[in-house]
Image (tube, helix red, strand yellow):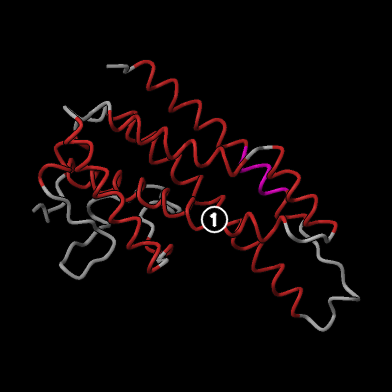
Amino acid sequence: MYYYAGTPVLLCNIICYSITTLSTSISSSQNVFKFISEHVEPDCVIFNNYVENYDLNEKLKVLNSFILDVLSKYCDDRNEFEILKKEIDKQTFENLNSMCHTDYIIISNKNLISSEDLSISDNDNSIIKLNDNVIKILDRIDEPIKFAIISLSQIVHEICVLLENTQNKIKEHKKSFMKNLITLVLKNEISKLNKLHKILEIRTKMLFDLVLIYKK
């Protein structure tokens, strides 16, 4: 097992954490999509129309599958890919159980943390203790593709957080005794959704272009 924070190991931890967080975010957002679509308040309808026009639910699922396919290209055989997939599924399952989104290693003003910013111990949940086989697979990924996956994972996470926050805002409005007097306003959420979706499109194209460049 690797416990130290050498550059390759640190980056492998970040890429693995990014992929599992992406899977966790997409999985946890499925009920949120359904919740928002069931509400008929004007701004809810507008928000949901944007979600449907962007085909956001399906787009996120396809992105998850696309990234797994990219990873499979760096595996020597099906067995290696199954080892990697098992690790990702395991971490995703644990994340869904704990829903510890705040442990996400990428979302900070620094975007990426350095080894100096990162302390590693047996009790540090921000680091995945990867086995040798998983590190060897992840270390084969070309550096630009690694960073493209990390940046794409970051924006997917931000979109899913926005969806959850919007859901919570709707719930709070429904519980309010003023709900019949004050209209639910999602103007800021709609604006942010549009902005994040544009970034998602740019980063998805960037990853796709890089995969073509480094096609094995």
Q: Secondary structure at mark 1?
A: helix
- The answer to whether 207 is drawn above or below residue 97 in the figure is above
Q: Is residue 129 left or right of residue 112?
A: left
- Tag 1 residue: 29
Task: Give the overall secondary structure of the magenta segment.
Answer: helix
Left or right, 97 with reference to 199: left
Does the stretch in magenta take in 192?
yes
User: Where 186 falls versus 154 (above or below)?
Assistant: below
User: Quadrant of residue 132 in the image?
Assistant: top left
Tell me which corner region of the image, top left, top right, bottom left or bottom right, holds residue 3.
bottom left
Residue 42, position in %: x, y?
85, 57
State the image coordinates of residue 116 (x, y, percent, origin top left).
23, 54
Residue 122 on the magenta span: no
- Residue ID at (30%, 43%): 15
Tag 1: amino acid:
Ser
Q: Nearer the viewer, residue 183 or 91?
A: 91
Q: Residue at x 65, y 64 (%)?
A: 167
Residue 14 image position (x, y, % from top left): 29, 47
Residue under the image location 17 percent in, 36 percent down: 80
Q: Which residues are magenta?
A: 191-197
In the picture, measured across the screen, residue 97 lies left or right of residue 118, that is right
Q: Say few, some or many: other residues with alpha carbon within 10 Å of mark 1 (under 14 / 14 to 19 / 20 or more).
A: many
Q: Residue furthest right?
A: 181
Considering depth in this image, is 63 or 127 the residue closer to the camera?
Answer: 63
Q: Quadrant of residue 76?
A: top left
Q: Residue at x 70, y 42 (%)?
A: 52
* 144 up-or-down from 64: above or below: above
